[in-house]
Amino acid sequence: MKNIIFFFVVIFLSSICVAQQKKTITPSVFDSWKDLENQTISDDGNWISYEINPQKGDGILYIYHRLNSKIDSVMRGYDAKFSSNSDFLVFKIKAPYDTIRKAKLAKKKADDLPKDSIGIWILKTNSITKFPKLKSFKFAKENSKHITFLLEKDALIKDSSNIKPKDTTTVSDTLKKQTTIEKSKKKDKKTKAKKKKEDNGTLVIFNPALQKTTHYDEVSEYEISENGNIISYILHKKDTIADSSFVFIYNTQTEISKNIYKNKGTIKKITPDKNGEQICFIYSSDTTKVKAYNLFYWTSKSEAKCIIDTLNSSMKKNWCVSENGDFYFSQNRMKFFFYTAPFPEKEFKDSLTEDEKYKLDLWSWTDTLLQPNQLKNIEKDKKKSFLAVYFLKKQKMVQLASDDIPFVTTTLKGDGNIGIGYNYKPYSKYVSWITDIFRDVYIVDFLTGNEKLFLKKAQSIASISPNGNFVAWYNKADSTWNLFSIKENTSMPVTKNLGVNFWDEDHDVPSLPDPYGLAGWSKDDKSLLIYDRFDIWQISTDNKTKPERITKNFGRKNKTKFRYIELDKEALWINTDKNLLLKTYNEDSKQEGFYSVKIKSKDEPKKLIIGDYKFSTPQLSKKSNVLLWRKCNFNIYPNLCISTIDFKDEICITNANPQQTNYFWGSVELVKWKTNNNEELEGLLYKPENFNSAQKCPMIVYFYEKNSHTIHNHYTPKPSKSVINFPEYLSNGYLIFVPDIKYKVGSPGQDAYDAIMSGTDYIVSKGFVNEKKIGLQGQSWGGYQVAYLVTRTNRFCAAMAGAAVSNMISAYGGIRWTSGNSRMMQYENGQSRIGGTLWEKKDLYIENSPIFFADKIQTPLLMMNNDADGAVPWYQGIELFTSLRRLEKPVWLLNYNGDDHNLKRRANSIDLDIRMKQFFDHYLKDEPAPKWMIEGIPAMKKDKENGYDLVK
């Protein structure tokens, strides 16, 4: 008996020792937490690559061999891609972090910083070949026996020592081979002195299996046919009189390069078909900066020839082929899609000095778009181009898009002859005060270019069936899905009288709700799958078969949302003959998981995996049934898992942050309560790992709309971009309460007050909260509501408001600088939920604006409003700050110069994290205030003193 007692005493003391060894999370340890990113699986399912990157420093690329569980790695590797035959892995290699940092400290320009290298990992031999100064790489979609990449000009000559492969025995001597065209070795010193940055480089074609390399200099573009048979590229030669361009094709079977076109001028947009038997490119003889192009066409049976120029009868007057847009062959190789545009404007010749010019933006009430929006999109508008198609056998061009119908979609990867066209222009002005985007929708006939107006002022995108027989669209006005038969020219509602809603029932802003969505179409256009809140409906296009729930009403009965997951990313339709994979979320339990269902079966969906986790969308290997996916919860980092397609034989293959066990973490639980209006709400309560209900803990209330569905989110310790870092605060003894907020139109401030105050009351009633030490924190919309709350109550002893709007009246007419649009829509029918114009509902704008009640604020307030915030004008923070300063209330405003709504610069994030934590520690834990809170930081000491020192 004594031995048993002694055993348990030892175990108890050991557990205390382990607990005492745990540490609290501080900014000094953030860098030990890493992010697992960019996972991918090979087509045969045997290899998985992923990156584990630190917050600062050099990351590592890992490769996992599923058959033997072996893991290999490459320092600084990233952006990895497996070849289609799973023979090799291609990736980029960054220069060492310290090397880049030293170069930046030396004030080197971006073009002079150390460049990436390329690595080719040959899986069978476990060997790596590297090449320096990478610009880009590509390989074929099928039969990828070669890897093709572009290096910086002269990279092989200047860095020949670096091209030797690592962990391989030999390197092919073919790098010394002469290219198949004449290369000039002479340098024009005068030209070199004036030479601007060029995009040309050295094209390398590498056969990893044979370690055989061929290269060509002065290459500006290259593309590979899908089947890997040819590599097409453009070679550009500089000349003092006129530059010359050449088009070559490299046959990967014969390893011979052939010149198929050459001319003085510029060649771009080289595009092979999937078999490498046809190539299109554009050519211009213009020597000016802006050029007009012609379209050329080559086949393996004939020489390259011009097929579209400005004289083509189908080309609009004063239009030409554009150099912008994505050019491509249809899947059946019978059409070529390209873009046209009006003649580019001639280069403007400036004859005035800077002091002779006036600088003006002229705002006019007749402008379709506001000046800031126009200026924001000016470069995009200069490149505006319009889709056209060339029928190769008929030798006929058809213009599909136009200035009146600028956007046209295709079907069946270009094989279809019917598309959808959109025109947003008549309603462009509305974006200033309406959140919905309106458009006119057209049916476009590719054979003739004729378009027929189908929907006027539609509020949702239309979906055309794969074979172009039907169009599905959602009508927000009557909340129904509709089906339009192109052949019959008839439209009918397909979701009326089904007994469920197809619109978002949680929609609580003053605008019409969006639908839950469309899963997709079945083969041969026979049906489409549509979501309601919980289930998935199959709607037949024959107007005879009754709509049915493929999920057998299981979703609604169990309050479980089903959403279809397409594992084949190239699928054009849903294969309704196979089991469908469905992702699920239960609204009550918050559990996620996956089910499968067979449409033709009478059985309910079959559970595959479910639990208290958040699951990623899985990746399926193309040639095996191996799934790659991630799962996490608050305590478990989202590591990588592999399994069978039905989630059996699950294996977790990574452990990105093992150090987490050394630190105090926490837990999260779902809480429910009722407001004073008897409305039931949910929220999340986070507790420290060493939580003791007998002790009174400080608590921070954080909120933004609804968050209870994020219960299984995992947060890594890292600097704050705008909100508190949950693990950091929990590790330091704080409780965190995150209430959901339900809104009504016209009372966003009151609704937040009702939810947050009642929720805080409920948590305090548990007995473990120090009710005199409760803080508030929110960002953006949440920041506004922090500012509003402290005008209504003195309950909170400190508050931090990030990017808060303090004055809805001045903000109403302001600009969202990210888009250049007016902020009116935010209030009239957007998130701010006022539900009317300033002149219609003046009282509500005042009632919901903290600035008008600044004299009521007693709570110490820390604010962040950055001068480059593209969402909330930073003067909103200035207005409240100057008011509180005038009232002699404790207030601080952080403005991170040149930074955005949520901080982008890591140094700024670290600073915010430190200051916010010091602020809350002072007021909620009675710790000494830092110097910056007592004395501020004078402008003369900016960037020299941080004021972090605590004043005791």
Image (spheres, rainbow, N blue to C red):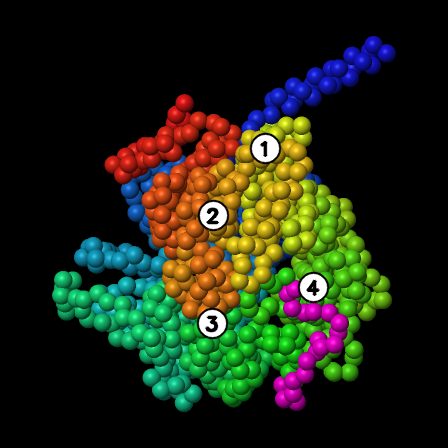
- Mark 1: give few (<14), some (14-19) or many (20+) Cα within 10 Å: some
* Mark toward the viewer: 3 or 1: 1
**As shown in the figure, which amino acid type bears the numbered disc 3?**
Phe
Q: Give the residue at x 46% y 83%.
A: 399
Q: Nearer the viewer, residue 143 or 820?
A: 820
**As shown in the figure, which amino acid type bears the numbered disc 4?**
Arg
Which residue corresponds to mark 3?
327
On residue 533, the disc is 4
Badge 2 or badge 4: first in the primary sequence: 4
Badge 1 or badge 4: first in the primary sequence: 4
- Dividing the picture into quarters, in which one does residue 908 lie? top left
The quarter in which the N terminus is drawn is top right
Badge 1 or badge 2: first in the primary sequence: 1
> Is 313 left or right of 658, judged from the image as shown?
left
Badge 3 or badge 1: first in the primary sequence: 3
* Mark toward the viewer: 1 or 2: 2
On residue 626, the disc is none
Q: Nearer the viewer, residue 766 or 434?
A: 766
- Mark 2: give few (<14), some (14-19) or many (20+) Cα within 10 Å: many
On residue 770, the disc is 1
User: What range of the chain is rendered magenta?
Assistant: 486-505
Alpha carbon distance from label 3 to label 2: 57 Å
Q: Give the residue at x 68% y 50%.
A: 674
Q: Position of residue 647 (x, y in %)?
A: 75, 50
Which residue corresponds to mark 2?
791
Element on which disc 4 rests: loop
Alpha carbon distance from label 2 to label 4: 38 Å
Alpha carbon distance from label 3 to label 4: 39 Å
Q: State whether residue 890 is above or below residue 204.
A: above
Alpha carbon distance from label 1 to label 4: 40 Å
